[in-house]
Structure formats: structure tokens, C-alpha cells
Amino acid sequence: MGDLLRQVADSERLFSAWNEVRDNDLEDGVKSDQVQDFERGALRNLVELSEQLSAGEYEPGPVVAIEVPKSSGGTRLLAIPTVRDRIVERAVLEVMDPYLDPVLSPWSFAYRSGLGVADAIRALAQARDAGARWVVRSDISDCFERIPRWPVMTRVKEILPDAELCLLVQHLISRDATGRAAHRVRAGRKQGRGLHQGSALSPALTNLYLDAFDKAMLGRGYQVLRYADDFAIPADSQTEAEGALSEAGEVLAEWGLELNESKSRIVSFDEGVEFLGRTVGSRDSVAAEDRASPLEATVYVTTPGALVRSRDDRVRIEHGEKKLLSVNLKRVRQIVGVGRVGFSTPFLHRALRQGVELVLLDDIGRFQGRLSRAMGGDVHVRAAQYEAALDGARALHFARAFVAGKLTNLRTALLRASRSVNAPEESAQDVAVVADRLAQARAGALEAGGLAALMGHEGAASRDYFACWGRMFDPVWGFTHRRRRPPPDPVNAMLSFGYTLLLNDAVVACHIAGLDPEGGYLHSLAQGRASLALDLMEEFRPVVVDTVVTGLVLGAKVAPEGFDHPAQEDRGCRMAPETLKVFLAAYEKRMLTVARHPGLGRRVSYRVALTAQARLLAGALVGREDSYAPLVWR
């Protein structure tokens, strides 16, 4: 039996799935006869279900097909599985989702944990703010009934490394039907078409099938914001929108589907675009991004010769006779000094007493040192951390998670960058090809048998990513690939500086979680190297730093002239003072951007999310959490 099918057959997973089925059945306040029958012998029934799945003897029962009227006219076909099949479907979906979700477009919003209508609306507002003026609005006619099953199974086999689980999925989508509308299910079955609307698997499989539509349109230069079979395509002009609508019809026809002509239209933001029950206009208050307003902030001191001192309850930053800043020390979490910055002795004592951390970087952003109050650490967490580092299999497990998270987010960052303001139109096809390679690299990383193989997948994927990413920039920037020591061009200079800032935030997160920042699993151990902090920041690199650089370069917020190239070759390229201020503001803005954290179940800033990930790792090490799951950007 394959490992994934074994996970489906696990008795605890089936019990959890049964609880979901029972809770869903009670949503209308009445427990159905079928659920009551199963409940009378629930424990026995679940054990029997587990044994049948393990032995390969499980056979799905027929669905009950009914028709319900649509508000727009006509009827919708529903196919309701038996209770035992609903339990199996829930278990299959839970096992399948970690393989399915990372391959989907970042603009597919339905049936995905942590994403929903609000995210789709924000994406539409983001397209508006990026310059789109028109939107194609449409959906797909009778989507569930018309989806061909064999191509769906082909995609399932591509993403699931377990032939037996794939066979189970095939049996579940090919069931016979009973009931008054059974003839419609059987007609589709003869044609090899139709996913059962009413099955827990069908929405996920629909997303997987329609992902081909999303990618094909992206390859033609159009961004599809899709919620199930309902979608919006932003465009800069009415002519472009008309072309997008025509090409959407062509692509869907290639995949055996049809546009709903009665719901297809082209509207402008000036008129107001109705999408998922909300109207997004050109001048409304819908925000593309939300940001946190923390009580404590990071202060960056970049003026050469500046002096940081304290006066009463305030920190003052002075340059000669000029006061640059005065802020209450209680509002400061960290002070980062870049280059030749001084600190008075009374201020140092005051900062240590109040827990304000000081970080020193040289003038090109290389880390020099940190001064912070002794934080101790959790001895039990650190003991478990070191024990896991000595256990090769367990260390590899954590390393795989860090790399898988990074590669997933590299793919999303690349796709999002291709839709940025001023991104070249011809990059769309290039990005689509590399995005597929990144998804394949992630799959390879999860199956890597050792650290060397894992690093091979990560290294090849990173080279593909940076090469494709760099082709979006004007050649005047001189960026072709990632180079660090020293950074030879402006883009590499910003990346290196940003990664240093992110590493510093990751070190702080490790301390807060009681971890040793130097005891890592992916990065090799070396004296003075914050290996675990480097591990933790991998999944955040594309989300934070790469996104900041993309926005600054493609958004024309910085220019190549805003960088210095010292005569000494070992000094590398560095940001001029004004460029550095712009970069630091953009970095801090990004770290305060909020996104939903699945573990916390709420939207938090990326800085808080980094600490949450460190705590999740600590919990996984000591057994408080089942495993470490990287933060995946959608």
C-alpha cells in the first residue's frame, strides 16, 4: 500500500473526517437518517472502513442524483455520496491538499484554506491600482457537469506520488448514480464527463482542472482572477479586454468547456465592477493590501556620523546640532545602525534595560553585530533542537519543509512579478514555463533522499528563478543572476541588504521561540553562522525581499543612478543614501503587510508570521505540534 493511501486509511484521520461529515450534516439543525444510521455503529463502521481501504477492498457506493432550481433559471445537478463515501472523500482531500494547493495559480481563490472572497476582491483592487481600467466578467457554463474526467485524472497522477491513491480518486469520480436525476449523471459517465457537485473532492479537482485555463491565459498575457468557475480578467484598455474575452472562449473550448455567454461582459472600473457580491470602482475604499500598526517599530539610522542618545523616556537621533528624530523609547523594538553611527553609553544601558535591540550593519549592509538583553532560551526546546540535528532523518524532514516552502513561494513571487506594473508583456510565456519547473522542483525536493539531493533541487530552482526574474528588468540594471560577495549590480545590492535585514528578524524570532539561531538543519553548521535563522527565512525571502525589489525596480521607485560603485572591487555596489531610505521604507512596509497565518487562524504582519513560524518549529521539536508546515504565499 502506498504511503499516501496509508494516511487516508489512518483511523484517526477517518475519525476526524467523520466528525466533519456529521457537523456538516447538522448545519440545518436536523440530523439525516443516513448519518444517524452510521452513528449507531460509528466506531465499528470506521474500523471496517480503515480495513477495507488498507486491503484495497473499498468500493464506493452510488451517488443520489437530484435537481435543484437555479435562481437564474434552469436546474443544477447535485450528486450526494453515501455517508461512508463522504468520510473517505474528506480523508482523501486532507491528504491530497498539500500536493494540490502549491501548483495552483496565486489568483485561484475558491476552496483553498486561508483564501476566500475578500482575497479575490483585494486582488482585483490591486490590478486596478496597477493600472487596469477594464475588466472581463464571465463564468463557465455547467462547469461541474462538463469537465472531462480523464484529463482530471491525468493531472491527479502528475501531482500525487501514489498510484493506489490515484486509483481510489478515479473510483470516487466514476461512481454510478441513483435517484430522479440519475440519467444526467449516467449520460455524463458514458461521455467521460462530469464531477459530482455534492462531493467534497469535486471543488478541489475542478480547481486542478481549471488551473490549466489559468496558466494558458497567463501564457497569453492575461491574469485570471478566478473563484471556482466565476472569473474576472483585468485589462488596460477596452480593446485588450475584448481580446481577453475572445481568447478565454478559445482556451476553454480547447479544454472542453464553454463560456456562459449570458453572463459575459466587459465593464470599466469607472462603472463599477461587480465581482463575488462586491462592487469595485475606480474611487472606492477597497484596499489592495492591509498593514499592521504595531505598538513598537524598528528605527533605521543611516546618516553617517549620527549619534543615538537618550533623554528622559525618549530616544534622540542627532547629527551635529541637528535633531533628526525623537521618539518615545517604549515605541521602539529595535534600532538598526547602518555605517558610521554612534551610541551614547547612557542610551546603551537604557536600551538594554527596556529590551530594545541594537543591530549594526556596515555601509553596504553586511551584518557586524547585535547587542541585546540576555534572553536565555528554553532548555527543553533547545535540547530537542540539538537532538533533531543529530538525527539525520528528522533533520532532513525539516530541511525538506524549508526548501518546499521556499520553492512554492518563489513560484508565486515569479507569477506575481509578471503582473507587476511595467513588467514586459513578452515575459508571460517565459514565466509560465519556469513556474512549472519550480513546481516540479518542489515535488523533487519533497522526495529527496538526502541533503545533497535536496540542495541540488533548491540550487537549480533558484538559478531558474533568478534568471527568469532578471529578464523582467531593463538591461540597464545589469542583473543576470544572483551574486553576493560582493554584489556587483544594484539589484544584487538590494537583495543582499534585504536578506541581511530579514536574517536579523529571523534571529529575533528564534530567540523569542526559545530556539538557538545557530542550530539549523538545511544550512550547514559553522561557528558564528545563524544556520537555523537562515533556514527559517528561506520561505520568507521571495515573500518579503524579492517582492520589495520587484516593486522598487518595476515601479520605478529607484533608478540605477541611485547606487554607488566604489573603486575597490571588494566593496561591491551599494545604495546611495536616498535610495537606502526608499529601500528601508519599502522593506518595513512589507514586513507590516498582513496576511492570513493558517496556524494562528488570523491575519498578521509578516514580522509576526516569522515569529509564529519559529514557535511552530519549536512546538514540532518538542511534540506540541504534529509537524512543521512552511508559510505558503498565495
Image: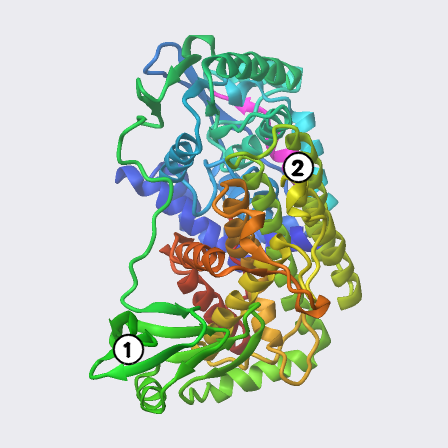
Residue 103, quarter of picture: top right
Could you tell me residue 357's position as x and y percent? 40, 79
Q: What residue is rendered at 46% in x and 86% in y?
A: 377
Q: Is residue 312 left or right of residue 213?
A: left
Q: What residue is rendered at 65% in x and 59% in y?
A: 403
Closest to the observer, 473 or 510: 473
323 over 499 or under it: above or below: below
81 over 527 or under it: above or below: above
Please report the bounds of the magenta region as a residue range.
Answer: 166-179
The Cα–Cα distance between marks 1 and 2, rounded to whole angstroms, is 47 Å
The amino acid at mark 1 is Val
Closest to the observer, 195 or 462: 462
The local secondary structure at tag 1 comes to strand
Could you tell me residue 179's position as x and y percent? 47, 20
Closest to the observer, 237 or 344: 344
Which residue position holds label 2? 431
Q: Which mark is residue 315?
A: 1
Residue 238, quarter of picture: top left
Other residues around mark 2 within 10 Å, as few (<14) / some (14–19) / many (≥20): many
